[in-house]
Amino acid sequence: MSTYLQDVARFTELRAAQGGQWDTVNAEYAARMAHQNRFRTGLEIARYTAGIMRRDMAEYDADPAQYTQSLGCWHGFIAQQKMLAIKKHHGSTRKRYLYLSGWMIAALRSQFGPLPDQSMHEKTAVPDLIEEIYTFLRQADARELGHLFRELDAARAAGDQVREQATLQAIDNYETHVVPIIADIDAGFGNEEATYLLARRMIEAGACAIQIENQVSDAKQCGHQDGKVTVPHEDFLAKINAVRYAFLELGVDDGIIVARTDSLGAGLTQKIPVSRDPGDLAHKYNAFLQTEAVARAEDVREGDVVIKQDGGLVRPVRLPNGLYRFKDGTGEARVILDCITSLQHGADLLWIETEKPHVGQIGDMVREIRKVVPNAKLVYNNSPSFNWTLNFRQQVFDAWQAEGRDLAAYDRDRLMSVDYDSTELATEADRRIQSFQADASREAGIFHHLITLPTYHTAALSTDNLARGYFGEEGMLAYVRGVQREEIRQGIACVKHQDMAGSNLGDDHKEYFSGEGALKAGGGANTMHQFG
C-alpha cells in the first residue's frame, strides 16, 4: 500500500497531465479520499482477511495461547462499535474477528419478522448483512482518518513540523477496522448448487470464512434445540466442495471453510446412504443406525426398509415421519468421524456443537481427531444457550465431590441461586469461566472462540434498564445518568452521534467539492460541540 505522500504525488502528476481541465481538483484531497477508501470491493476484503486468518492459524499451531475471538453482530452499527471499542481498549484489532450468526439474521433481519433458527429467513439476507457490516467498518476507517487529516492541517497551520511528521506516520501506519468475518451459511439453503450460489454471493460481499453444518437443509434446527437431522457424509462433503469452488472461482485461494457437526445432539437421519464397499463412509454411517434383526420374511412389515449389515439382515428403526434413528450413545463417535472426514475432504476448521461448555468433553473428542489429523483446530461457540453459571458451578461441585470434599452446604440442583454467589464454590466457578477460553485453546484445540448472540442479549438488557427508569420515576435522568453521562466519562465516541453518522466526513467532502461555497453542518451552532 502506498504512503499518503506518495498518493499526493501521484494525484498531482495525474492532475498536471490533464492540461488544466482538473485544476479544480486538489491532489491532497484526492489522496485523502483514496486512503479513506482502501477497500474498493468485497473481494478485496475477502482476500485481505483470508490472509489474516491463515496467518493467525499458523501462529496458533505454533502456540495455542495465540487463539482468536469474536462476537456475533446483527447490524453494521453493532459491528462498527465493537471494533471501535477493541481499538480503544486493546490498541489493536489483531486476533479479533466478527461472527455473522444465522440465528440472529432469522430473529432480527428477516422480512417475515422474528423467526426461529430453521433456515426460513431469506438467504439473501446473509450476504446483505456481510456487505452492511463492511460498509460500517469502512466508514469507521474514513471517520478516524478524517480526524487525522484535520490534525495534519492543524499541525501545518501552527507550523509544528514535529506534530506534522507524527501525524503523517499515524496516517501511514493506520490500522483498519476491517477484520475477518466468519459467516454462517446454515446447511446451505438447498442442494450443493444452491450452496455454491449463496457462498459465491457471501464471498463477493467480503466473507473470507464460511461455516456450514451437516444438518438436512430443509429440516435445519438451531444447534441447541431438539429434532436435529444430519445428512450422510457424501452429501455434506459435496457442499464443502461447492464452497471451495466458489472461493477458487472468485480468486480467494486462501478462503476458509468451517465444517460444523451437529451430530453430538442429533439422533436422526433422513437418508440411508448406499454402501458399495465394506468400510466405506456409507457403511460407517449406517453402522450407527438403530436397527432390529431380521431373521425371516415375516419379520418385515409392509413398506419396511431392510439392509444387509455385518453379514446379516437388519431393519433400521424408522419413525412415523420417515426419519431413521441413530443408536443411543453414538454421538461422540459420529462427531469424531464427521470431523476427520471433513478435514480430509477440504475443510480447514471444525465446529463441534455441544450441549455444555466442558473442556474435558471437547478435549477428549479433539484428541481422537488429532490421532488422524494432527493439526485439527476448532471454532467453538461460547453460546448464550448455555447457562454458564449453573454449568460451571455444577462442574466444580462434581470435581469437589470426586475429591471427597464436604459439600453439605450446597444443593447441586439450586446452585444458580443468588444465595451461593459469595461462596467459595461460586468463586471457583467464576475463575474457571474466566479462564475457559485459554484452557480450552490449550487443552482442546480451540483456535477461535465466538459468542453467537451476545449483542442480541446486550441490546435487550440495556433497553430494559433504560425503559424501567425512563418510564418510571427517574424520567429523563434514567437516560442522562445511565447512558449519556457514562458515554462522556468513558470516552464513547458515539456520544458525538452526528460525527459517528458521518457529519464531519460530509463537511470535509463539501469543502473538497465546493471550496469556500460549501454549506457545512459543523459550525458553532452544532450542539455536538457541547461534548468537547
Image: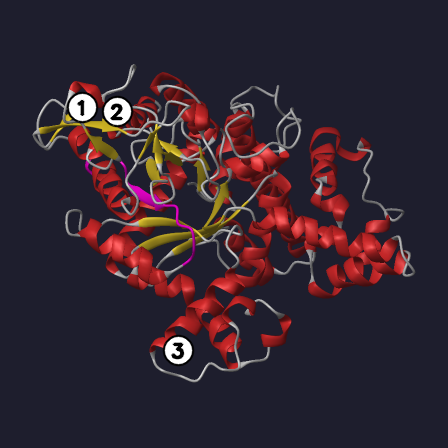
Residue 348 sits inside the magenta stretch: yes
* Residue bearing the label numbered 3: 400
* Residue bearing the label numbered 2: 272
Q: Are marks 2 and 1 in contact (CB under 8 Å)?
A: yes
Secondary structure under the numbered disc 1 in the rendered image: strand
> Which x, y percent locates residue 512?
69, 33
Quarter-wise, where is residue 125 in the image? top right
* Farthest residue, direction front: 298
Q: Which kind of residue does numbered mark 3 sit on?
A: Trp
151 sits left or right of 326 in the view: right
Give the residue displayed 53% in from the left and 82% down from the top. Answer: 409
Decide which of 221, 328 is in the foreground and name it.
328
Residue 71 in sight here:
yes
Secondary structure under the numbered disc 3 in the rendered image: helix
**Magenta extent:** 344-357
* Residue bearing the label numbered 1: 307
Q: Which kind of residue does numbered mark 2 sit on?
A: Ile
Q: Which of marks 3 and 2 precedes in the sequence?
A: 2
Q: Which kind of residue does numbered mark 1 sit on?
A: Ile
Q: Which of marks 3 and 1 precedes in the sequence?
A: 1
Q: Label 3: few (<14), some or many (≥20) within 10 Å?
A: some
Decide which of 43, 73 is in the foreground and name it.
73
